[in-house]
Amino acid sequence: MAGRKRGKGRINRKKGIENKRAAMDIAARYLLLLLASLNSLWIFYIIFTPLTIQAAALLLKIFYTTEVYKNIILLNYEVVIDMVRACIAGSAYYLLLILNLTTARIKLKKRIWIFLFDSSLFFLLNIARISLLAIMQVNKIAAFDITHKLFWYGMSTIYVVLIWILTINIFKIKNIPVYSDVRFLLEQAKRKLQ
């Protein structure tokens, strides 16, 4: 009888330690999200602005004479592509980070790989989008304005959703962002009240 009680006590202690670690993990993930959002997502714009401008210019150089001046890409010495913050889409990278960090039970190494995969895929789609719009503008295609607005108002979000669905399948993610964390915390609170 005494052996059973000791064994049960060890299991309860181990479970308690696991629950504390899980709670600390949740706190750390959400704190990181909060820190990343400070000062208008500056971290994403510092990283992705030069990368996006240089990659788009490199791709457009295949078709046109291309020069870069700070945040402007000049095509054929006449068409100016002003790479404003919306072109860089820092908020889309942040949304990918939100999905990543609010999903429970992912080991740190896998979480980093997921974010690198998601960011790289979005980056490539964004470069393709910018290049398509630039080509339309150079060739004075009438549908440029409507295509630009369509991309501006909805496509980035659709890209993020599709990337996340792909990520769920590739990385075999079982938990639901935010919901799994809230469920865990509610279960812990319920146990403490009993």
Image (spheres, rainbow, N blue to C red):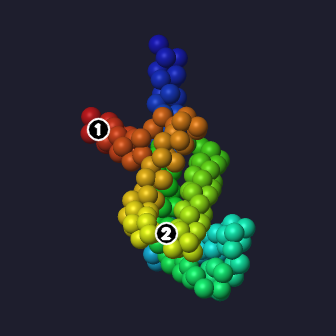
Instruction: Name the one closer to the observer, 87 or 74.
Output: 74
| Residue 121 image label | none
Which is nearer the eye, 16 or 35?
A: 35
Q: Secondary structure at mark 2?
A: loop
The amino acid type, in three-letter code, at marker 2 is: Ile
Disc 1 from disc 2: Cα separation: 61 Å
**Mark 1 vs mark 2: in front:** 2
Dot 1 surroundings within 10 Å: few (below 14), some, or many (20 or more)? Answer: few
Report whether 126 appears left or right of 23.
Answer: right
Query: Dot 1 corresponds to which residue?
Result: 190
Residue 6, horizontal then vertical, whole percent:
51, 23
- Circle 2 is placed at which residue position? 141
Q: State the residue at coordinates (46%, 59%).
A: 156
- Residue 134: image quadrant is bottom right
Q: Is residue 175 above or below residue 52?
A: above
Q: Name the N-terminal-most of marks 1 and 2.
A: 2
Residue 53: x, y in percent? Answer: 63, 74
Give the amino acid type for the residue marked by disc 1 in the picture.
Lys
